[in-house]
Image (spheres, rainbow, N blue to C red):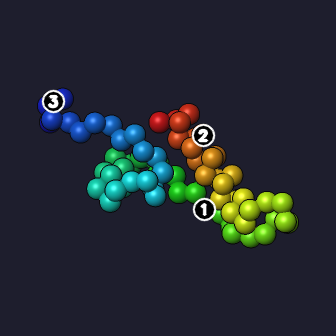
Amino acid sequence: MANSQREPPLSKHRLEQMTWPEAKRAAEEHRIVLQPLAAIEQHGSHLPVDTDNLVVGELCEAVGKAHP
């Protein structure tokens, strides 16, 4: 395929932010796709129940930006 016909590189790295064609393309290109997964649980009265999800989400963002 000529360069002018190539699709632009995928800029997304988190599965939940991709459309299904983007996810399919990422799989076909053998790209690493990050899917944050964590518990919803209490951490005391001072933290939200999705604290673990917030942490793993930020970790995925950092990894995706450092290794596009």
Q: Amino acid at mark 3?
A: Ser
Disc 1/disc 2 C-alpha distance (Å): 15 Å
- Residue matched to label 3: 4
Residue 37: x %, y % from top left: 60, 62
Disc 3/disc 1 C-alpha distance (Å): 38 Å
Q: Amino acid at mark 2?
A: Ala
Q: Secondary structure at mark 2?
A: helix
Q: Amino acid at mark 1?
A: Leu
Q: Are marks 3 and 2 in contact (CB under 8 Å)?
A: no
Q: Earlier in the sequence, mark 3 or mark 2?
A: 3
Left or right of 13 on screen, residue 50: right
- Residue matched to label 1: 37
Give the vertical position of 22 relative to 63 (above or below).
below
**Can residue 28 be seen here?**
no
- Residue matched to label 2: 62
Give the vertical position of 50 relative to 30 (above or below).
below
Left or right of 47 on screen, residue 34: left
Q: Quadrant of residue 44?
A: bottom right
Q: Quadrant of residue 38?
A: bottom right
Q: Secondary structure at mark 1?
A: loop
